[in-house]
Amino acid sequence: MYDLSAIRKDFPLLEEYIYLDNAATTQTPVPAVEAMKEYFYKYAANHGRGAHRLARMTTDKYEDARETVASFLNADVSGTVFTRNATESINMVAYGLQWQAGDHVIVSIVEHHSNLLPWLRLRNQGVDVTVIPANEEGIIEPQQIDLAITDRTRLVSVNHVTNVFGSVQDIGKIIRLSHKNNCMVLIDASQSAGHMPLNMKHLGADFLATPGHKGLLGPQGTGILLLKDTETLMPIYLGGGMVNSVSIENYQIEASPARFEAGTPNIPGVIGLGRSVEYVKDVGVENIEKHEKKLAKKAASMLSDIPKVNVYGPENRAGVVPFNIHGMNPHDVAIILDQTRKICVRSGYHCAMPSLQRMGLKGTVRASFALYNTIEEVEALAETVSDIAALIAE
Ligand SMILES: Cc1ncc(COP(=O)(O)O)c(C=O)c1O
């Protein structure tokens, strides 16, 4: 059984706020906060660098978190790299691959800026970039990828779920199609990891990027890059912790994942993330997916029934519901929702300007759901939006 009231006890902030900005970042459950507290109070030290017991304990806990994350996403431990966020994970691929002038990359128009700008900048190195369209609902038709692929295409980089519309891409098909044409694939799983089942080995993606601080419920400052083949990428940061021998003439880089984690990592964050991933696993990602989809469906349906309100995105959506009140600036709507009912939503372009501009939109209000949200919160949102829309009509 999905025990929502027990889950909500682990997120104290929800007693005071209606938090519907989960696509930006989620709340972190008490057990993960406790795990970080335990690190600071009982064994804080640096990772992998000391013979003393605190350093060994820190290293063990950090590596335990890696095993937890790898097992949850069914990835190889050696190909599970901790980063600061999804943006860093994607940039590590963009700048870790060795490009030749004339190489070709395919992305879509419905990407977050983090999965767009690193590729657009590669154009400075002579890399060709094709931005394929998506339909009105934010769905990428795999056929568009087929049409765009050339014999110079090296990589297709697309989202699994759009942060703007909640559209779910057919990534299985996209990966098969790309591999058939000898192209590597990066999946931006920022809006899917922890929200729906995700299995790196079954998918066969070459790279998968996700933050730790969204559906995986970890703290901010955590991210993950999964690699199918750890030899494909060069590390973009060099320094301590990622070499096993150094002389002035030469240096020998460690194997993955150490080679991709130069410098002192976010140790407390990763330990918190490991614990929050266990939390997601205990609740059950299939249960979470079902719950969030139910909330999103209800929200989309209640909001569309309100005169002067437009809801965007597909009917069968993940937990993201963008909308506008006709004639109102989305930021004003967000401010009123907060000031009247402490409802926290996102407003604006959601770091995906081209995705909204192609529809002539200057922004939306976005409600996005997590495992702890309730139908009552959806109703409170719809009631308040209805009140705001009625004011405009007067
Ligand atoms: C689809 C998508 N990609 C990438 C990102 C960037 O994530 P981060 O802020 O962890 O770098 C986000 C964040 O909202 C996102 O929704």
Image: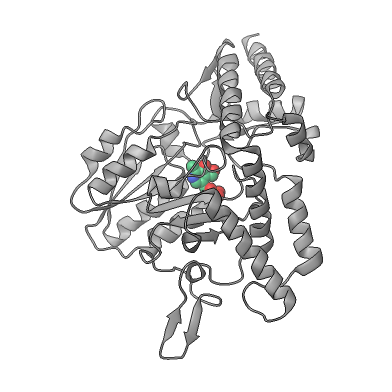
Q: Nearer the viewer, residue 104 or 270?
A: 270
Q: How is the image coloured?
A: one colour
- Residue 162: % across, % down: 47, 36
Residue 13: which quarter of the image? Answer: top right
| Nearest the eye: 283 or 325 | 283
- In this view, the residue farthest toward the bottom is 248
Judging depth in this view, the residue of 195 and 90 nearest the camera is 195
188 versus 42 height, above or below: above
Return the x and y of residue 279 as percentages of the image width and height. 67, 45
In the image shown, does 83 or 281 lie closer to the viewer?
281
Q: Is residue 8 above or below residue 51?
A: above
- Where's the N terminus, which quadrant? top right
Tally of marks: 0
Q: Does residue 218 appear in this view?
A: yes
Q: Residue furthest front?
A: 1
On-image quarter of the C terminus: top right
Whole-percent x, y for residue 166 in the image: 49, 31
Q: Identify which residue is drawn at 74% across, 57% down.
A: 36
Q: Residue at x 44, y 51 (%)?
A: 208
* Quadrant in the rendering for residue 290: top right
Residue 351 showing in the rendered view: no
Q: Looking at the image, which residue is at 72% across and 72% down?
A: 45
| Residue 199, position as x, y percentages in the image | 46, 45
Left or right, 284 with reference to 172:
right
Q: Is residue 345 above or below residue 257?
A: above
What residue is rendered at 51% in x and 75% in y?
Answer: 242
Quick check: 278 left or right of 133?
Answer: right
